Image (cartoon, helix red, strand yellow):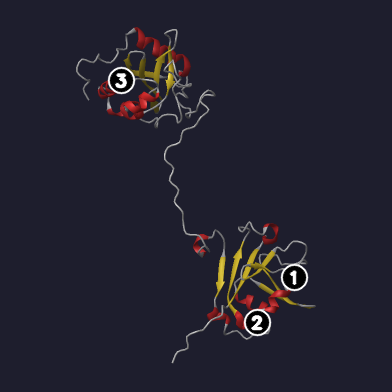
Amino acid sequence: MAAASGATPPATAGSADAAAIRSVMMATWDKPEARLEVAPISIEGGHAVAGWIQGDRGGGPCCGRDAQGQWLVAVCGGNGLKDPKMLAMAGLSASAARSLASKVVQAESAMPAPRRALLALFDGMPPGPVHRPGTGLGGPCPGPGRPPTLSQDDSALTLGTISITSKASGPLSTRSVFSSVDIVGADILENEHVDYSWELLSKAPGVQVTQFKQGTDAGRFSFRGFNGEGRINAVKLLIDGIPSNDNAGGMPFLDAVFPLDIEAIEIVRGTNDARYGLNNIAGNANVITRTGGNEAVPA
């Protein structure tokens, strides 16, 4: 891209300003184990963009003069420094930003494509305000190999547009649960000849049922080496989603549901459900009852 008519050409590597900018960057980031290359350097008045390459990384900080006329690094960026709007955030006027952006494009166009690709690796510019009134300078540039950060003076963080998209709520499908899930449906349960509802859980793989026959507790179930006994109900019984273990971990309320009233039994293994904490170490079993209403009878 050619420079605008009448604009001064990009600063050469031998100019005093370019040498000063290169000296600042080399003193800050050049290391024996990671040599820093600074080129090209484009200058517009009291602002400049200097490309850098260090190993397989690259970018281009925007530099400016302080009150004493010394060159300092203001903002780090990549392709964003070719955008006049981004340069204006560093304190340049609109006309100066357009001129400097044009010079950056012109200088980089003369470089080999692989080197231009390295200069573009630094993604965007640090978020938030970067301009210090009266100086045209922002906070310290993170430099090669470091993530963008804000200075302590630039404590405000400006965010762009944030889009929040809601999703349908409700029960998750079995494929969306990061655990082992088994569902025993009505087509199996309705054909079982049992005396107690707890016996139906034997139809789920890996579930063991045990006769208890003490008080109101006829039987219990267990899986993954845990049952519902003790102070911690390691196996949680739910009836239509309502916790139904008693204080001792027993399951007397399960016998209050007639076997023919059960629509399905869901077995969820593992501690994924945070609602029940330690009472859900092995998992939970949800007994789903039939809902009332008029059922269509075939003619």
Direction from residue 107 to residue 279 in the image, left or right: right
Task: Classify mark 1: residues with Cα within 10 Å, few (<14), some (14-19) or many (20+).
Answer: many
121 w.r.t. 62: above or below: below
Q: CA distance from mark 3 to mark 2?
A: 82 Å
Which residue occupies 34% across, 28% down?
Answer: 85
Mark 3 or mark 2: name the one nearer the start of the chain.
3
Q: Position of residue 285 (x, y in %)?
A: 63, 69
Which numbered circle lies on residue 100? 3
Report the residue marked by disc 2. Answer: 258
Dot 2 alpha-carbon crowd within 10 angstroms: few under 14, some 14 to 19, many 20 or more: few
Amino acid type at circle 2 is: Phe
Query: How far apart are the alpha carbons under marks 1 and 3?
Result: 77 Å
Whichever of callouts 1 and 3 sits on the residue coming sooner in the sequence is 3
Which quadrant of the view contains residue 248? bottom right
Residue at the spot x=70%, y=65% of the render? 226
**Numbered circle sitting on residue 250:** 1
Q: Amino acid at mark 3?
A: Leu
Disc 3 element: helix
Q: SS at mark 1?
A: loop
Q: Residue 196 location, x and y as percent?
A: 68, 81
**Whether residue 107 is situated above or below residue 163 in the rendered picture:** above
Residue farthest to the bottom? Answer: 299
Q: Outermost residue, front direction?
A: 133
Marks 1/2 in contact by CB < 8 Å: the verdict is: no
